[in-house]
Image: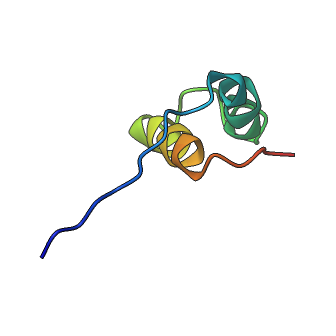
Amino acid sequence: MNTEFNIQDFNPELIPSLQHKPDNKGNPVGSLGQLESLALQVGLIRTEKVN
């Protein structure tokens, strides 16, 4: 079985809007630890603009 993946580079312009979401919740910035980093990675993989 030959499987090919078309993996695109992430758009660095999305980083500020993706970080804005968890940073403006009711918890202190950074208090969610690795979950915040994981959320950013997933958001960049999705490649969709966040409102």
Residue 29 in the figure: left or right of residue 21: left
Q: Is residue 30 above or below residue 2?
A: above
Q: Is residue 13 above or below residue 43?
A: above
Which residue is at 34% across, 56% downward?
5
Judged from this view, the residue extending furthest toward the right is: 51
Give residue 10's position: percent from left, percent from top. Answer: 54, 33
Which residue is at 78% across, 44% downward?
49
Judged from this view, the residue extending furthest toward the left is: 1
**Count of marks placed on residues:** 0
Q: Is residue 16 above or below residue 37?
A: above
**Of 20 and 15, which appears nearest the observer?**
15
Judged from this view, the residue extending furthest toward the bottom is: 1
**Of 6 and 42, which appears nearest the observer?**
6
Which residue is at 76% across, 42% downward?
26
Which residue is at 40% across, 37% downward?
34
Give residue 28's position: percent from left, percent from top. Answer: 65, 30
**Of 35 and 51, which appears nearest the observer?**
51
Give residue 42's position: percent from left, percent from top. Answer: 51, 48
Q: Tell me the quadrant of the picture where the N terminus can be found.
A: bottom left
> Which coloring applies here?
rainbow
Residue 41 in the figure: left or right of residue 1: right
Judged from this view, the residue extending furthest toward the front is: 2
Residue 14: quadrant of the picture: top right
Residue 44: quadrant of the picture: top right
